Amino acid sequence: MFNALAAALPVDFLKGLGSAAPHLFEEAFNEVSHSAVIDPSQVPVLVPHVRRAMFETQFKRQAIDAGLKAYVRPTKKGGGNFTVVEAGKFVFTASFVPTRGHAVRSADFRTEHSALNELLDQGVLFENEEEVPNLPNEVIAESEAIYGILLYGGDLSGKSNFFMEFAIPEVNGTGYVDHYSFLDVLMAAQELVAPASDLKVQGPVPTLKPHAVPKVGKKDGTTDTDKT
């Protein structure tokens, strides 16, 4: 799964998002906290919403710039929207979580997308149409897609602890089949597209060792609310 993920994601997308995203938390905090029309008591209430809007914008923008298909869809109940990025056999959304590997909160669109991973849970990668699970109409992705979530998090002001990682949710949405460090995926994607001669010219490039490839994440059944 890790190698398939690295092969599906363009290096330009990973580099672009990896460069832009770490600054978004601080930008969101500054935008809200420096506003003359917002009382300080409302800053921690509003910042997560602005932060999410900024992240979703970059998520979509970097994907399109890298040649991927990306679009925004309304939530099932119409109270918001979410960005979808398609890359090869994968389809991604993004979610804030308080810590690495933390379970995302329950949401209809994530539950429906997680149904795409029903056969993945059984070790089957949709070899033919008969094996595709019976999905609700609201599912956006192609029937042969694998659903992944780009998890991101950090402290409110963006001063520390920022992280990103890719997670493949279980079909019931309460845990993960796998989750991988964003940096590990970027490094692997670079190695797949760069000829050995180019790597020598550019200087030392970190090489993933077998033990450095993230292992299957712990199943986390917690449902603490995130801000997505």
Image: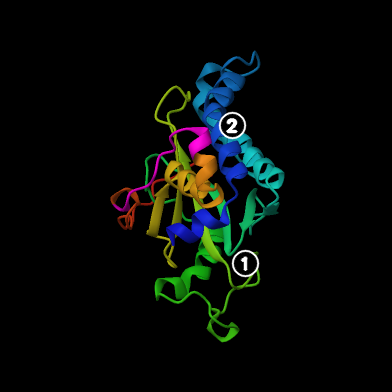
Query: Could you tell me which quadrant the N terminus lies in?
Result: bottom left
Asked if residue 206 lies in the magenta stretch, the reply is: yes
Q: Is residue 96 visible?
A: no
Indicate whether 221 appears above or below 136.
Answer: above
Q: Which residue is mark 1?
A: 139
Looking at the magenta stretch, what is its main secondary structure? loop
Work out whether residue 94 or residue 104 is closer to the camera in this orientation and state it.
Answer: 94
Indicate whether 32 appears above or below 75.
Answer: above
Q: Position of residue 222 (x, y in %)?
A: 34, 52
* Left or right: where 69 falls relative to 89: right
Q: Position of residue 164 (x, y in %)?
A: 46, 41
Indicate whether 39 appears above or below 161.
Answer: above
Precedes in sequence: disc 2 or disc 1: 2
Indicate whether 185 appears above or below 124.
Answer: above
| Amino acid of disc 1 | Val
| Amino acid of disc 2 | Ala
* Left or right: where 124 falls relative to 133: left
Instruction: State which quadrant residue 50 falls in.
Output: top right
Give the magenta range: 200-210
Query: Could you tell me which quadrant the C terminus lies in?
Result: top right
Asked if residue 110 lies in the magenta stretch, the reply is: no
Identify the residue shown where x is 62% and y is 42%. 12
**Residue furthest bottom as drawn:** 130
The local secondary structure at tag 1 comes to loop
Identify the residue shown where x is 62% and y is 67%. 139
Q: Which residue is mark 2?
A: 20
The local secondary structure at tag 2 comes to helix
* Left or right: where 212 falls relative to 142: left
Separation of residues labelled 2 and 1 (CA atoms): 29 Å
Give the number of the disc on residue 21: none
